[in-house]
């Protein structure tokens, strides 16, 4: 039973934008080469068919030339010319399809590059937003810590030494622990967003 192994390559993508770009870069040249090969095959087949038709027309022309009545050979020449024009027209249409396929492939490449750039820009903007938000929250926590320190100092001054001061110290330590815990949570939860 075959085992499916996951790739050890870790993609740094947002919504698969880089993966799509890589897939485009891998398959687009294969697509273009396939179209070119099929076009070349069809053009060669048309050339062979035109050559064979010309041979048949030449054979019929020779066959009619042995008849006692002089046949109008210009009909054979006209038929041969019509075949050649038809073949050249079809070859031009094939070349047009190849050109259009190349243009579509180029548009696909450009679109994949644009999507990759959009995803990269969006990721950078999101990271900047998260970084600024974390910085603002840390400043707010620092300000709250300074305000708490001033408030507890003023409270200790009012209550003096004694059992009330012990309660104030305990509440201050709890508030400081809470502020430090909030800073740690901010750091832990935003570590993957902030580089």
Image: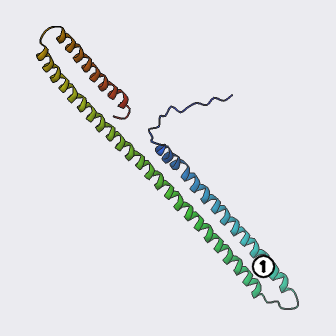
Q: In the image, what residue occupies the spot 57% across and 56% down?
A: 32
Q: Is residue 50 above or below residue 4?
A: below
Displayed quadrant of residue 53: bottom right
Q: In the image, what residue occupies the spot 88% across and 90% down?
A: 68
Viewer-side residue, 65 vs 57:
57
**In x, y percent, where is residue 14?**
45, 42
Viewer-side residue, 52 vs 133:
133
**In the image, 168: left or right of 181?**
left
**In x, y percent, where is residue 18?**
46, 44
Secondary structure of the residue carrying tag 1 is helix
**In x, y percent, where is residue 83?**
71, 77
Displayed quadrant of residue 98: bottom right
**In the image, 177: left or right of 31?**
left
Q: In the image, what residue occupies the spot 55% across and 64% down?
A: 100
Q: Is residue 32 above or below residue 165?
A: below
In the rendered image, which residue does mark 1 sit on? 58
**In the image, 172: left or right of 98?**
left
Viewer-side residue, 151 vs 98:
151
Displayed quadrant of residue 48: bottom right
The residue carrying pointer 1 sits among few (fewer than 14), some (14 to 19) or many (20 or more) residues within 10 Å by Cα, namely some
Outermost residue, right direction? Answer: 68
Of the 4 image quadrants, the one containing the C terminus is top left
Of the 4 image quadrants, the one containing the N terminus is top right
Q: In the image, what residue occupies the spot 20% across and 30% down?
A: 143
Q: Is residue 186 above or below residue 60?
A: above
Q: What is the basis of the colouring in this image?
A: rainbow
Viewer-side residue, 45 vs 61:
45
Outermost residue, bottom direction? Answer: 69
């Amino acid at each position: 039973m075959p085992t499916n192994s996951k790739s050890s390559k870790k993609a740094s993508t947002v919504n698969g934008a880089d993966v799509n770009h890589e897939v485009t870069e891998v398959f687009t040249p294969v697509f273009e080469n396939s179209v070119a090969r099929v076009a070349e095959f069809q053009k060669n087949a048309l050339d062979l068919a035109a050559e064979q038709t010309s041979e048949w027309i030449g054979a019929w022309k020779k066959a009619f030339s042995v008849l006692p009545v002089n046949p109008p050979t210009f009909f054979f020449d006209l038929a041969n010319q019509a075949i050649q024009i038809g073949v050249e027209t079809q070859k031009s249409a094939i070349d047009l399809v190849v050109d259009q396929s190349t243009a579509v492939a180029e548009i696909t490449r450009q679109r994949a590059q644009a999507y990759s750039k959009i995803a990269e820009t969006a990721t950078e903007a999101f990271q900047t937003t998260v970084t600024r938000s974390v910085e603002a929250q840390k400043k707010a926590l620092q300000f709250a810590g300074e305000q708490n320190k001033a408030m507890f100092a003023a409270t200790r001054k009012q209550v003096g030494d004694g059992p009330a001061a012990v309660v104030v110290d305990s509440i201050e330590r709890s508030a400081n622990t809470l502020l430090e815990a909030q800073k740690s949570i901010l750091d832990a939860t935003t570590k993957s967003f902030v580089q």
